[in-house]
Each structure stands twice: as C-alpha cells, then as structure tokens.
Image (spheres, grey):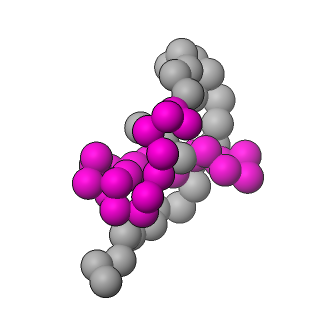
Amino acid sequence: MYLSTNGVKSHIKSVENFDKVGFDWDKIQVMFPAEVDTIPIAPEYEIANW
C-alpha cells in the first residue's frame, strides 16, 4: 500500500502505521501494478512514536 501525494508515492509499511496517522480506509484506490510502477518513489519516512 502506498500514499500518493505531489506526484510521488510513499510505501506504508503496515496496517498499524496506516491507522496510526489516521488515514481513511474508504479513500483507498485500487490500481493496476503497471499504474503504480509509473509513480516515482518518495524518500523513506518514519512514523513517530508519540
């Protein structure tokens, strides 16, 4: 699963991270792998443990 913003994609490493930042499951868009492959990859990020 990826977050796609500003023309790049960021890998969401786990369901826990997805939920931790408050993303909405209803906003997930299913794409073909070939479509996903055309989006550049953003630098890695870490979810803070607050």
In the rendered view, does 7 fall on the left or right side of 24? right
How far across and down, in percent of the image, does residue 1 sit?
41, 38
**Relative height, residue 19 to residue 36 (above, below):** below
How far across and down, in percent of the image, does residue 43 sit?
53, 61
Quadrant in the rendering for residue 29: top right
Q: Residue furthest bottom?
A: 50
In the rendered view, does 7 fall on the left or right side of 27? right
How far across and down, in percent of the image, does residue 36 sit?
57, 28
- Residue 19 belongs to the span the image colors magenta: yes
How far across and down, in percent of the image, does residue 46 sit?
38, 69
**Relative height, residue 16 to residue 50 (above, below):** above
The residue shown at (42%, 62%) is 21
Residue span colored magenta: 4-28
Position of the C terminus by quadrant: bottom left
Relative to the observer, which residue lies in front, 13 or 38?
A: 13
Relative to the observer, which residue lies in front, 7 or 48?
A: 48
The residue shown at (52%, 22%) is 30
Q: How many marks?
A: 0
- Residue 9 belongs to the span the image colors magenta: yes
The residue shown at (55%, 36%) is 27
The residue shown at (53%, 47%) is 3
**Relative height, residue 34 to residue 7 (above, below):** above
